[in-house]
Amino acid sequence: MRRSGVVIPLALLLASCGETAAPVGPDATVPADRPPVVDAPSPTADTDGDGLCDLTERDRRTDPTNPDTDGDGLLDSFEVRAGDDPLSGRSPAATNRIAFTEGDTTRLAIVTSLDYQGAGESLLAAMQNRTRGVDDLDASDLVDFTLTAVSANPAAFVGALMGPRFVGVAGRAVLTWQLDAQLRAAGDGGVMALGCRRAYEATLTVKRVGDDVVAARPVVVDVAPAAGATASWPRVSREGFCLPARCF
Ligand SMILES: [Ca+2]
Ligand SMILES: [Ca+2]
């Protein structure tokens, strides 16, 4: 007896039906092309109370739950306002820091040096205000700065030291200045105590006399409240920082 029809191998039959092996596991039923649901940050909320709004924190890639994302002691909002990198971990502004306590008028000093190749010119150091504090004051509004040229190495390469100035720098020398800073007392041209911590940024510049700036170093003035002080500022963070009227 002759058999009619075609014998189709079982494996080929399964393939032709489009039956492929389904993945087995907990995600087998979750569509792969659905994006995760993420709430848009609020443009006016400030979850970590650092003065930087949640939406801005997303744009700047800072942590909206950490007021000092890089842990360098400066609020995210201050670093953004100062044009520093709030993610760097070592803001240039944090390198030279002068820390005051409200009401304490002790003189504090920092020393800074510059390796310089001179051709007989004079160099002058000066302080310039840079980033205002949350109270809209400049560093020089509350601090008296004094710059003094203290030493040159080799000394023979410099003609004279006059106040903040090295006169007649001829050859390569390391020039060292001392910056003295003193917080003005309230009622003596100084500012009222706010009872919360804030920062102000200035720049220590070195210029060739009658010429351009040859070096610029940021200096942060950090003012903390006296122990037990009560904040008089309208907005204060959980960590005791004075905050701007609204987050930005
Ligand atoms: Ca914030
Ligand atoms: Ca910081």
Image: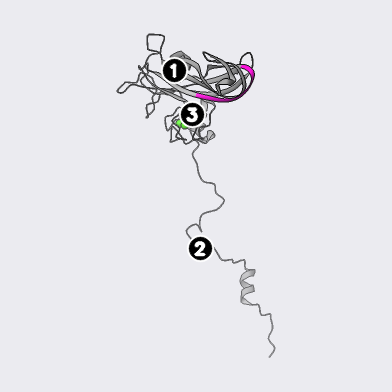
User: Residue 91, position in %: x, y?
Assistant: 50, 31
SS for callout 2: loop
Decide whether the magenta segment is chiefly helix, strand or loop. strand
**Label at residue 181:** 1
Q: Looking at the image, which residue sits at the far front?
A: 156
Q: On the image, numbered disc 2 is attached to which residue?
A: 24
SS for callout 1: strand
The residue at 50%/16% (across/down) is: 148
User: Residue 68, position in %: x, y?
Assistant: 44, 33
Q: On the image, numbered disc 3 is attached to which residue?
A: 95
User: Residue 131, position in %: x, y?
Assistant: 51, 21
SS for callout 3: helix
On the question of residue 76 being in view, the answer is yes
Whether 194 is among the magenta residues is no
Amino acid type of the residue tagged 3 in the rendering? Thr
Q: Earlier in the sequence, mark 1 or mark 2?
A: 2
Q: Nearer the viewer, residue 94 or 234?
A: 94
